Image (cartoon, rainbow, N blue to C red):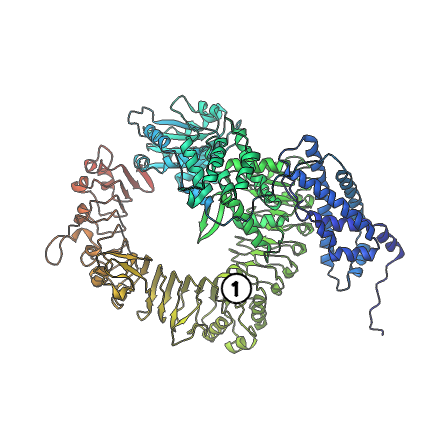
């Protein structure tokens, strides 16, 4: 009996306190469930609390414990009235000032309640008592000194809520239900692909730019018009017009987006222009104004250039004059095109030509609307919707953006929704900016409450900022906008759906896609204006913090400022994001000490070496970005007190040496980004406890101290079953023997086999080449068999002889059936891997695997790279081919001489052994469209693979030959058979003398009169003294580039016969060649003067154009 634990005794004083404050505790509980569904929002009135939360079993239990069920019923009535008021307010598109004031007061109370209960829940979860709920509640409320303060706060909050809920002035008519359940078609992409009705504008502007009688060195052309007319799209059409490209050798694009009409950041604009001139490379960081203008003037000096300054707002004539004085050094005929919404800005720019962009014509407006609203049915739209649609288009006042937004909103909707939009939402757009916003806001009003929250939060990003999709989703989650809805298993799936809805309804644009996935988006300026308007004062973007922040601000982003301008006082801010600025350690400490209510915190790229312990006090924090802090070496231990942390980014923290040992306390962590943490050698034990983790891009099986570290690491990895996306596993060699791995490794099933959502795995083996390394690597690999859903598989520095028992040897089998990309990199011992079939594999790379022998069938292969490989390696694409004579069949059925071949998949082949091609059946690689021969140290002539090139004759479009030291001939047996070749690149072949290849073996010269070659590049060819004679027959040649060919001292007179040539680049060649090609004065100038774009480079300096 002495070992039995006694029941906890509650002092009479504490018991009285519990009884006294029980009502407030219930209020806190209820308020939490109410607010988490949508009251935490930057939108004006957006909310969708559910009274069903009041029936929560845990709430009922607490009420029963404290004997206050009647108070629960009272609060239920309060919440119902509040919910009704907020729903009415949300549906009402416009409210009076007094009504808005009531809503703001309610939201302030709800924010306070949310903070209070979030703190309560966090403390309770930290306690982690194993006893029943009664003991947990009483112990928590009695132990923590903050409980009384919490209760007093709730008392005030409930008083506010009761007062507002009982007010009788919220009598609004609720608008129709929002649009939902739309099919996932690509309407949001269609309008981006089609710019309709701007051909006359394009021709007019191009005519001005190409006018030969222009007198000024640099002229200005403003394109002016209201927002949404498509000024930027028109400027892009002009910028990419072939006639314009041929006229202006130097073309620059800069998005100004200054917005402040009274102040223009001249230095910032000059910096952007210089970055554009340097092809996006920022070489001017920290540069003074004098150094900046000097570099830019040097770039522009003597060149005919076209510069587009997009989205200029400034109406300050003096600052505009200062900016333009640095742009005056161009050659006669240079132009600066400016897009602006302000006619005053257009007048300041100058008295020259001006293009005032108008709305689309009636016919073009209808055409655009049909394409967006009716999709594939636009040619024959339903008759009953045509008249309604025509009326809606009229109300859009021919503004393309408004048409696209409304058309996207109505796509695939029933007629009653069209009639609703026609009747309710659209006020006729007048001639001013204000008229478009109601149309754009119409889509906003039709969103569900959580979607309104998500869109409104986008106002925290600066205009024209490229927004990472994953970062945006993580921030939404941090603010509590994403809740499980019963249809999804996790919040990320809900957020993905929200993002897709906003994208297809045109809230986002300019989509960046990488590897088939949406990576980032932008928001149109007008949509950003809508987001700012609905967010009101709750979201603020500034470039300095030098005083108290408005108490209404809940989300703050700061950009382009320095430490000296920052001041942090106590505030209720929930988001702090930084863009492009530096902040010292003292400022970080002040921020952490005063901003205790943060849910999202970005301290990226600050160059700090450490963080103060006070970061552990941010108990509400869900999102923490410390990326690119290259000097950060260690994290404070209290950081593991961030109980609610969901996203933790340490991307690019190169100096970080270790993570806190008790990292496993961050039980709600969902994202841990460790890419670029190169000094980090191991992960702490127990990371497998982070079962919510779904993104962990680096896992380290190392500590070097004991065998047990590896085994516990494998078990931790196995426990993380929810991982998705990309995972790199770093595997050091430990001197323990393979038997120990097999004995102690993943006991049942592999460490990766339970990760069905993992798409890409990279294995990086490392360590000495000591005894037992081969067996060790094989044993570890056996434990890492991935799930069949895997799409990308990479293996680096593996020293095993056998791959594993995953694929069955000696018979053709399907190995990882969903694999699309596979890499074997520097696996020198890897040998026979059996017969394998990869039905979906598109990319295969084998690098420095000289002993690898396998038979691989890859019917979908698109990109094959082989370097330092075994000639017995067999890779069979087995692609399908179509021809008029034979229909669709495999290559063995259709002869290569067939006159009409078409290939379902074009193959890019990169090899370092031309002779290997001869060992394969000639139909193995039919359909090769690009061939790269790189570092073949044996090949002397392409004629060594003559039959192969004959088989490529009708398919090969691009041929690149690099670093083939013995190569002497490329034409005979090679180029002469490639009748479809359009691009040829030859580089770093020291023995090649192209000018000597003038005759075939039969003594006849090669004269490819109808050869389709369009682009020819020759570089680092020391024996090139004359252009190859066969070049004169390349009548389709458009681009000729020659670099680092010091032996070439002149160009032949037949260059003038290459009438299709549009671009000539001669770089880092002999001084004599540069001199002979100088404009007007050079001896060879008459032979090349017909070429529109000529660029001569000497010692990294461009001499002309």
1094 shown above or below 24: above
Q: Nearer the viewer, residue 35 or 123?
A: 35
In this image, 1005 relative to 144: left or right?
left
Q: Is residue 623 above or below residue 198?
A: below
Where is 10 relative to 202, above or below?
Answer: below
Q: Position of residue 298 (x, y in %)?
A: 37, 34
Nearest the eye: 699 or 32: 32
The quarter of the image holding the C terminus is: top left
Residue farthest toward the front in the current orientation of the protein: 384
- Residue at the image position 46 percent from the left and 47 percent from the top: 186
Left or right: 598 in relation to 758: right
Q: Is residue 459 visible?
A: no
Figure quadrant of residue 247: top left
As drawn, the residue found furthest toward the top would be: 351
Task: Find residue 975 and report its horizontal and vertical position in percent.
Answer: 21, 55
752 on left or right of 1083? right
Relative to 452, is 1060 on the left or the right? left
Percent coordinates x, y for residue 148 in the rendering: 81, 49
Question: From what the image shows, is residue 60 above or below residue 229?
Answer: below
Q: For residue 859, which quarter of the picture?
A: bottom left
Dot 1 surroundings within 10 Å: few (below 14), some, or many (20 or more)? some
Q: Nearer the viewer, residue 393 or 1072?
A: 393
Q: Confirm whether residue 77 shows in the render.
A: yes
Q: Which residue was labeled with disc 1?
A: 756
């Amino acid at each position: 009996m002495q070992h039995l634990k006694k029941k906890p005794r509650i002092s009479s004083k504490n018991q009285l306190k519990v009884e006294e404050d029980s009502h407030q505790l219930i209020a806190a509980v209820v308020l939490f469930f109410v607010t988490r569904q949508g009251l935490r929002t930057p939108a004006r009135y957006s909310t969708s609390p559910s009274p069903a939360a009041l029936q929560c079993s845990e709430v009922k239990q607490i009420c029963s414990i404290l004997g206050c069920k009647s108070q629960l019923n009272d609060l239920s009535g309060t919440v119902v009235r509040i919910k009704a008021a907020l729903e009415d307010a949300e549906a009402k598109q416009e409210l009076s000032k007094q009504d808005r004031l009531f809503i703001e007061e309610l939201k302030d109370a709800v924010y306070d309640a949310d903070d209070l209960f979030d703190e309560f829940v966090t403390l309770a979860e930290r306690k982690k008592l194993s006893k029943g709920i009664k003991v947990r509640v009483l112990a928590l409320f009695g132990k923590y000194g903050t409980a009384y303060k919490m209760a007093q706060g709730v008392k005030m909050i409930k008083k506010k809520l009761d007062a507002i809920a009982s007010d009788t002035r919220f009598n609004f008519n609720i608008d129709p239900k929002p649009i939902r359940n739309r099919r996932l078609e690509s309407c949001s992409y269609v309008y981006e692909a089609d710019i309709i009705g701007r051909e006359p504008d394009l021709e007019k502007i191009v005519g001005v730019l190409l006018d030969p009688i222009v007198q000024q060195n640099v002229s200005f052309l403003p394109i002016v018009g209201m927002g949404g007319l498509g000024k930027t799209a028109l400027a892009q059409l002009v910028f990419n017009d072939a006639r314009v490209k041929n006229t202006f050798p130097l073309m620059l694009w800069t998005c100004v987006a200054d917005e402040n009409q009274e102040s223009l950041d001249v230095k910032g604009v000059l910096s952007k222009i210089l970055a554009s001139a340097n092809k996006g490379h920022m070489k001017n960081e920290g540069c003074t104004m004098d150094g900046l203008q000097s570099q830019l003037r040097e770039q522009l000096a003597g060149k005919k250039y076209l510069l587009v300054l997009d989205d200029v707002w400034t109406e300050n004539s003096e600052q505009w004059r200062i900016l333009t004085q640095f742009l005056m050094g161009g050659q006669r005929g240079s132009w600066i095109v400016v897009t602006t919404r302000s006619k005053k800005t257009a007048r300041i720019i100058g008295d020259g030509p001006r293009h005032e962009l108008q709305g689309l014509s009636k016919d073009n407006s209808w055409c655009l609307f049909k394409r967006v609203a009716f999709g594939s049915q636009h040619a024959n739209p339903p008759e009953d919707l045509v008249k309604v649609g025509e009326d809606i288009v009229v109300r859009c006042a021919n503004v393309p953006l408004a048409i696209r937004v409304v058309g996207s909103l109505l796509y695939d909707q029933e007629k009653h929704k069209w009639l609703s939009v026609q009747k309710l939402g659209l006020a006729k757009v007048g001639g001013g900016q204000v008229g478009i916003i109601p149309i754009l806001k119409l889509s906003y009003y039709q969103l569900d409450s959580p979607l309104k929250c998500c869109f409104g939060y986008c106002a925290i990003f600066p205009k024209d900022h490229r927004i990472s999709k994953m970062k945006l989703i993580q921030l939404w989650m941090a603010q509590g906008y994403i809740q499980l809805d019963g249809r999804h298993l996790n919040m990320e799936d809900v957020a993905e759906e929200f993002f897709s809805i906003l994208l297809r309804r045109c809230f986002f644009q300019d989509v960046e896609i990488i590897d088939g996935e949406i990576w980032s988006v932008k928001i149109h300026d007008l949509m950003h204006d809508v987001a700012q308007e609905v967010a009101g004062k709750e979201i603020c973007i500034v470039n300095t913090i030098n005083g108290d922040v408005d108490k209404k601000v809940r989300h703050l982003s700061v950009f382009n400022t320095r430490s000296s301008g920052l001041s942090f006082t106590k505030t209720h801010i929930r988001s702090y994001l930084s863009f492009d600025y530096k902040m010292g350690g003292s400022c970080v400490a002040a921020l952490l000490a005063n901003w205790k209510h943060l849910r999202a915190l970005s301290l990226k790229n600050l160059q700090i070496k450490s963080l103060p312990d006070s970061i552990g006090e941010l108990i509400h924090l869900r999102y923490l970005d410390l990326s690119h802090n290259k000097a950060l070496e260690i994290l404070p231990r209290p950081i593991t007190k961030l109980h609610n942390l969901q996203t933790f980014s340490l991307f690019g923290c190169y100096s970080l040496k270790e993570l806190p040992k008790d990292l496993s306390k961050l039980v709600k962590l969902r994202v841990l980004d460790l890419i670029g943490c190169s000094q980090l050698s191991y992960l702490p034990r127990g990371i497998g406890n982070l079962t919510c983790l779904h993104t962990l891009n680096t896992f380290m099986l190392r500590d070097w101290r004991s065998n047990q570290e590896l085994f516990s690491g494998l078990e931790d990895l196995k426990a993380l079953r929810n991982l998705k996306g990309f995972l790199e596993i770093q595997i050091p060699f430990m001197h323990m023997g393979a038997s120990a791995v097999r004995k102690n490794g993943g006991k049942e099933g592999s460490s990766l086999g339970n990760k069905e959502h993992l798409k890409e795995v990279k294995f990086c083996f490392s360590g000495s080449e000591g005894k037992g390394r081969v067996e060790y690597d094989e044993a570890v690999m056996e434990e890492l068999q991935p799930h069949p859903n895997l799409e990308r598989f990479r293996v680096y520095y593996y020293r095993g002889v056998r791959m594993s028992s995953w694929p069955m040897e000696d018979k053709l089998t399907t190995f990882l059936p969903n694999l699309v990309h596979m890499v074997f990199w520097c696996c020198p011992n890897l040998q026979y891997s059996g017969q394998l079939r990869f039905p979906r594999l598109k990319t295969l790379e084998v690098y420095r695997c000289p002993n690898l022998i396998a038979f691989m069938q890859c019917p979908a292969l698109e990109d094959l790279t082989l370097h330092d490989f075994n000639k017995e390696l067999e890779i069979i694409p087995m692609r399908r081919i179509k021809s008029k004579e034979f229909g669709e069949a495999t290559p063995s059925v259709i002869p290569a001489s067939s006159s009409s071949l078409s290939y379902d998949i074009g193959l890019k082949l990169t090899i370092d052994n031309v002779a290997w091609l001869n060992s394969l059946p000639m139909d193995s690689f039919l359909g090769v469209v690009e061939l790269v021969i790189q570092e073949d140290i044996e090949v002397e002539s392409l004629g060594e693979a003559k039959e192969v090139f004959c088989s490529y004759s009708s398919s090969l479009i691009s041929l690149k030959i690099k670093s083939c030291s013995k190569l002497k001939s490329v034409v005979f047996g090679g180029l002469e058979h490639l009748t479809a070749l359009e691009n040829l690149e030859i580089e770093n072949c020291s023995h090649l003398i192209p000018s000597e290849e003038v005759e075939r073996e039969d003594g006849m010269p090669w004269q490819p009169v109808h050869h389709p070659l369009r682009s020819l590049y020759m570089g680092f060819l020391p024996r090139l003294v004359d252009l190859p004679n066969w070049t004169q027959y390349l009548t389709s040649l458009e681009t000729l580039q020659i670099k680092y060919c010091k032996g070439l001292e002149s160009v032949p007179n037949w260059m003038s016969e290459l009438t299709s040539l549009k671009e000539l680049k001669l770089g880092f060649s002999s001084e004599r060649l540069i001199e002979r090609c100088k404009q007007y004065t050079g001896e060879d100038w008459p032979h090349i003067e017909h070429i529109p774009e000529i660029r001569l480079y000497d010692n990294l300096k461009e001499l002309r154009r």
